Amino acid sequence: DGGITQSPKYLFRKEGQNVTLSCEQNLNHDAMYWYRQDPGQGLRLIYYSQIVNDFQKGDIAEGYSVSREKKESFPLTVTSAQKNPTAFYLCASSNDILGQSLLGYTFGSGTRLTVV
Amino acid sequence: GQNIDQPTEMTATEGAIVQINCTYQTSGFNGLFWYQQHAGEAPTFLSYNVLDGLEEKGRFSSFLSRSKGYSYLLLKELQMKDSASYLCAVRSRDNTDKLIFGTGTRLQVFP
């Protein structure tokens, strides 16, 4: 079955360390997205990519970096510059890059990052 | 600016009907989505509206009024498993599939 996989499910990071969250999809989707979800808040867009080797900043990109070297993969690195990284991180993909998809996103199951 | 408002929490009784409202102010509009999210899990697609009116899908219906910047999700014959967060998301008209999400409404269904 096609889907989108995030790993790990839980991740602990010491302050000052960089950490990379994995996101892989086998849906042949062109567009991929990273969102952050905090308690009582909605999903906020960190980065998105509409095509391989290209990505754009979202609303809260500071302290994060991404790459899109393969269509299937869109890893997110949380750097030490991100001052409040503890959150639930969701990766998503969609099969349309022009705003015409009828199903919106397919989401991964999320990674809960905790800074210790 | 871009703003999507939903009530933070709602409660209802098993078997009842509940309506979750969503109002939006965005720079352009190209469709509105509703997702269901159980705690600690991925959101799952419920409905999509791009034209005014009601879309019905089993126990769930979604309504859109573009002129009022307003949508609602109607859940009928509530079941305990419907206890979840419900996310309203708007796609802006910028030739991407990018979604802007509201804060989500946490629904608790009681016996």
Image: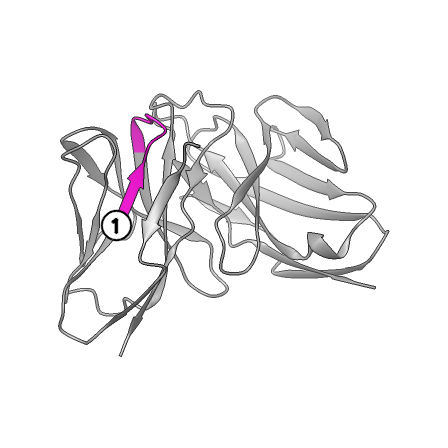
Task: Check the residue under mark 1 and report the chain it is in.
Answer: A
Q: Secondary structure at mark 1?
A: strand
For residue A83, what is the image quadrant? bottom left
Residue A66 in percent (x, y) is at: 18, 46
**Please, what is the three-letter code of the amino acid marked with disc 1?**
Ser
- Please say whether residue A25 is one of the residues in the magenta stretch: yes
For residue A82, what is the image quadrant? bottom left
- Who is closer to the viewer here, A7 or B17? A7
- Please say whether residue A96 is one of the residues in the magenta stretch: no
Image quadrant holding the N terminus of chain A, namely: top left
Image quadrant holding the C terminus of chain A, namely: bottom left
Residue B53 in percent (x, y) is at: 70, 24
Return the residue found at the far bottom. A116
Q: Is residue A46 left or right of residue B47?
A: left
Residue visible at 86% across and 51% down?
B15
Residue B77 in percent (x, y) is at: 83, 46
Magenta range: A23-31
In the displayed structure, B85 sits above or below B67; it is below
Q: Which residue matches tag 1?
A: A22
Q: Label 1: few (<14), some or many (≥20) within 10 Å?
A: some
Residue B107 in percent (x, y) is at: 67, 58
Residue visible at 55% across and 53% down?
B104
In the displayed structure, B20 sits above or below A56; it is below
